[in-house]
Image (cartoon, rainbow, N blue to C red):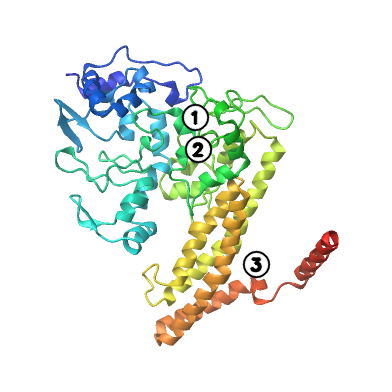
Amino acid sequence: MISRTVMISLTCLVAISAFAGSASGQTWALTKFSEETKECAACHKQEDPGLYQQWGSSAHHRAKIGCFECHAAKEDEVDAFKHEGQWIATIVSPKDCAKCHEVAAREMTESHHAKAGRILGSLDNVLAEVVEGNRGLVTPGFPEGNSAAAVNGCWQCHGSQVKVLEGGKLDPATWPNTGIGRINPDGSEGSCSACHSRHAFSVEQARNPDNCGKCHMGPDHPQKEIYYESKHGIAFMAHKDELRMDSPKWVVGEDYHQAPTCATCHMSATPSKPATKDRPAIKGQSVTHDVGMRISWNNRPMVSVRPEVSDKKMGLAGADVDWMTRRNNMKDVCLNCHQKQWVDNFYVQYDGLVHLYNEKFAKPGKALYGFAKAAKELPSVNFTHDVDWAWWELWHHEGRRARHGASMMGPDYTHWHGTYEVAKTFYTHYVPAMRELIEQAHKSGNPERIKAADALQAKLDEVLNSDDHKWFLGKTDPEEAARRKKAAEEFKKRYSK
């Protein structure tokens, strides 16, 4: 029997260009399959023919990398179990993949993707575990029960904390799971198979926008829908058969130019460019598995922040990479298809939308919610009042849609699914819920609640009397009213018959 240490040393010699994004396309591989892998394959060919065929079409197979090289385990590993005379583990974690794909695994584990499992215990999970769910799903790893809503919903994208039972078996509440931020038994965070589905690990699939759409869709982060609405998505649908997405070397502007995918903009390689009269020479970027290195706003929080701010909060290496560097990384991608003025002007538009959302709705809305919580009957319990739900949907759903829509040039998501919904919720749900809460607090007779309600009323008056919101009180600035009247008259004159 070949020890796992020896086998890992052998497999570390492998560098598969399809995964590493090698510009040369050179591939190093073992000369033959190990005896252990041959034994695995002989059985699984009969027991799991689909799995066997997927592996058979993969770059791993062509490099003579098989079952044993990935699944071999040491006897003392927490999820190891004896199978046909060998110690193996079901889960192949990023730590395992890093034995050969060192750079890709490091970049991924230093990214926000790998930290997605930290949602466990967050406000989102209060919804899934308490508000939507109960403890009805009882498993050996959760004898007191867990919420099926969290297990089947949140955890499948964000990742579960995989629990190992006796004999290396995995608790059914936590496995199967390919959540991008899965917390693995070996302590590593992340799941390479979230994007590179087992056992084919198809680079073509990983580059397809639908691959990202497993998680990046829906009311709170509809990047997939936004992409398909945008000119980028329209071009992709028209030309997807021309993009050579199965090519080991895949450099935008060199190997394809018809349309970008999610991978193009956020991960894939770019060519070097000579200097022009408008810009200096640009050194091309290599493939990256840290999807935050080309993002200049983090639009996930209540108030958009620069990505290095959130990276520092999460203890990520990206804390040392400022937003302007990341923006220039993305501009480098854009300039393969667009002219410099086009790219620069896009960012003026995008920044304008983010600032609008932040300053008009997010910052005052967040401040109001701080006052409102103190005035509630149950101040420390979330989702017990209309004010909780209105604020949650305003920033978590509608505000994200507006910002993500602008970032990817999806106008309908920016406006009708975004800023329109933000404004509607703010003025017809959030403000009325505040007023109702103030009234309830005053009727309660509770001195603390009454004091908090008075503070909330003062803050609400301050916000509504500000330049952004005073129209709602019938206090539109006379100059603005005159401009609106003039514009309406010109419109009628232009189009009236």
The disc, 2 or 3, on the residue closer to the chain's N-terminal end is: 2
Q: Residues within 10 Å of mark 3 (few under 14, many from 20)?
A: some
**Quadrant of the snapshot with the C terminus:** bottom right
Residues at marks 2 and 3 touching, judged by CB atoms closer than 8 Å: no
Mark 2 nearby-residue class (10 Å; few <14, some 14–19, many ≥20): many
Residue 456 in picture, x, y percent from top left = 50, 76
* Residue type (three-letter) at the residue carrying disc 2: Pro
Q: Position of residue 112 (x, y in %)?
A: 43, 44
- As drawn, 186 above or below 250: below
Going from the N terminus, do you reach mark 1 or mark 2 first?
Answer: 2
**Where is residue 202 shown, x and y percent of the image?**
42, 28
SS at badge 1? loop
> Which residue lies at the image location 51% right of the left edge and 39% below the top edge?
293
In the image, residue 297 sits, relative to residue 276, either above or below, namely below
* Residue at 73%, 72% in the rendered image: 477
245 or 239: which is nearer to us?
239
Point out which mark residue 287 bears.
1
The secondary structure type at the circle numbered 2 is helix
For residue 209, the mark is 2
Residue at screen point 54% across, 33% down: 264
Q: Which residue is mark 3?
A: 468
On screen, residue 179 versus residue 430, left or right, reads: left
The kind of residue on which mark 1 rests is Val
Residue 440 is drawn in which quadrant? Answer: bottom left
Please say whether residue 93 is visible from this viewpoint: yes
Q: Which residue appears at 29% of the width and 33% of the height?
A: 92
- Amino acid type indicated by mark 3: Asp
